[in-house]
Amino acid sequence: MSGLDWLILGGTLLFIVGYGTWRTRRAGASLDDYLLGGRTASWWAVGLSIMATQASAITFISTPGQAYDDGMRFIQFYLGLPVAMVLIAVFAVPIYHRLQVYTAYEYLEGRFDRRTRTFTALLFLVQRGLSNGLSLYAPALVLSAILGWNIHLTVWLIGGLMIGYTVSGGTKAVAVTQQAQVAVIFTGMVIAGYLLVHYLPENVGFTDAMRVAGSQGKLNLIDFHFDPNDRYNFWSGITGGLFLALSYFGTDQSQVQRYLAGRDLTESRLGLLMNGLLKIPMQFGILLLGVLLFVFYQFNPAPLTFNRPVYLEVAHSEQYGPQLRGLERSHATLFKARAQATGELVAALKTEDEPAIAAAETRLQTVQAANLGLREQAQKLMKQAVPSVEAKDTDYVFLTFVLNYLPQGLVGLVVAVVLSAAMGSAAAGLNALSSTTVVDLYRPRRPGRTEAHYVAASRWAAVGWGVLGIAFATFAARLENLIQAVNILGSFFYGTILGIFMVAFFIKSVNGRTVFWSAVVAQIVVAALFFGTDIGYLWFNIIGCALVVLCSVGHKLLAVSPGINKA
């Protein structure tokens, strides 16, 4: 990056952190003020905070690459989200506001017992603690590879800034900084999208780009084919995605805390509904960037692999270098054929000449297949040379374009987008981990202390979870395939947690002992299915929730049957 990029990157991050710290410098006098910002947030602040919490750096690093490789079918992941927002606004938010709870799990002790509350809080702490580490590791991994940064220093940079303003100002600091982060994120992504279209050949406009993408199967928005092993189709999105969204937004403290900070019930509900209305269009736009990247690289040379540092390492080795350089030469030859075939396809599409369109599509598909074969050979070769490298390199697609094609200044802005998203999401998670630790685990065992004592405990808990997250992110650098795990990890726990809350809300006759053991059984079954089958992970949200509910109801029915009573 140039000096100007470093200046913009550093200035943007310092402004966000400094502004948030200054605006909330007097926050934290009471536990209510520190954990929930005094419950004074407006609906739009609640909505922006919810969106920023969900949109981690992985969203802006990985999602364009996923669309580049697999098209737009990932959008189906979010089909159930708007329905979930309405259901949570109708059923869950009024209960939380009426009871004036600090955490979602606080409600469970009054409804069931302390054991159920503690078990559910522990499930959340394990899931969110690991997710926060992954949220720090994923952007650090990509940025260190693309920019040559040391991954450990990158993790500490992101984590240290996040801990600083979260510990200082609590929920209010997280919310204020997230507003600035969202502004930076949307500005950077809009500029990148505009430039992608601008950099296409003069005779290729946005409509032409969409036609090319559609002819290559990249606009595959909806798939009605049912396959339980397929992660992204209409059925998994509208059912598994619905249950995941219900659990995430309705029971995950990192999200619940965002709308508990609303000044009243209406503001909290409107903030949730704002997220329901804007999330799918936002995700559509990010996926569209990936599709535009695909079209862009039909006319511009794409690297054989986007993981450039590993490519250079292998290319310069005596054992594997000659073979890799041979693949690179074949790849360069194929690019010329691909650009020519794509140009012919654009011309045929403009004239609506069906025979010419079919011929151009056939030529382009032949070239794409040959190119895919070369990429697979290169990835296999690099895996042999560097066993620790991740074979799939699509997470590097967007940042490679940013570094190679964006003008000076904008590179720093887009890298700031990635770091801002990482800090915004992880800070909300850290804030929620701190709240749950103190309110659900510490305060019940240390009752009667002063507000100042619990605020201090919350700050220390935030520091502790932040350091643990950084430590896990550092350790994660030794493992493989963890970027995708951040999406899977939630589904491993969310179904069970949602099932507990479903019983709490709607089946009043079930007691704490019954739901506790039902939840234990459900989590064991989900773990067995996760490690022993190939079921798409979205289905675990339904399975876990259904098992908790069915086991609870089944035990209740058996307990009141005549045979059981006689026994």
Image: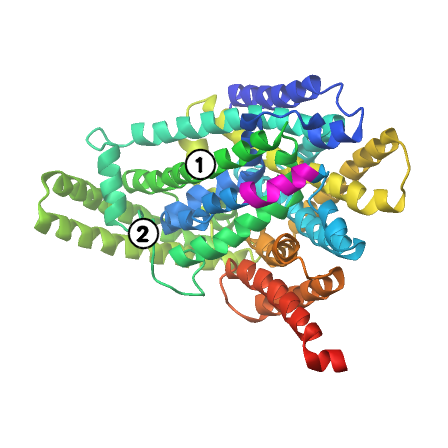
Q: Residue 559, located in which quarter of the rendered image? A: bottom right
Q: Is residue 165 visible?
A: no
Query: Residue drawn at (61%, 24%), measured in percent from left and top?
Result: 13
Which kind of residue does numbered mark 2 sit on? Ser
Contact between marks 1 and 2 (CB within 8 A): the answer is no
Going by the numbered disc 1, the residue's amino acid type is: Leu
- Residue assigned mark 2: 330
Measured Cα–Cα span from mark 1 to mark 2: 47 Å
Q: In the rendered structure, which segment of residues is drawn in magenta?
A: 88-98
Which quadrant: the C terminus? bottom right
Q: Position of residue 300 (x, y in %)?
A: 31, 38
Q: Residue at x 67, y 75 (%)?
A: 558
Disc 1: which residue: 277
Image depth: mark 1 or mark 2 in front: 1
**Residue occupying image coordinates x 53% and y 54%:** 243
> Which secondary structure dominates the residues rendered in magenta?
helix
Q: In the image, is residue 92 part of the stretch drawn in magenta?
A: yes
Specify which label sits upstream in the sequence, 1 or 2. Answer: 1
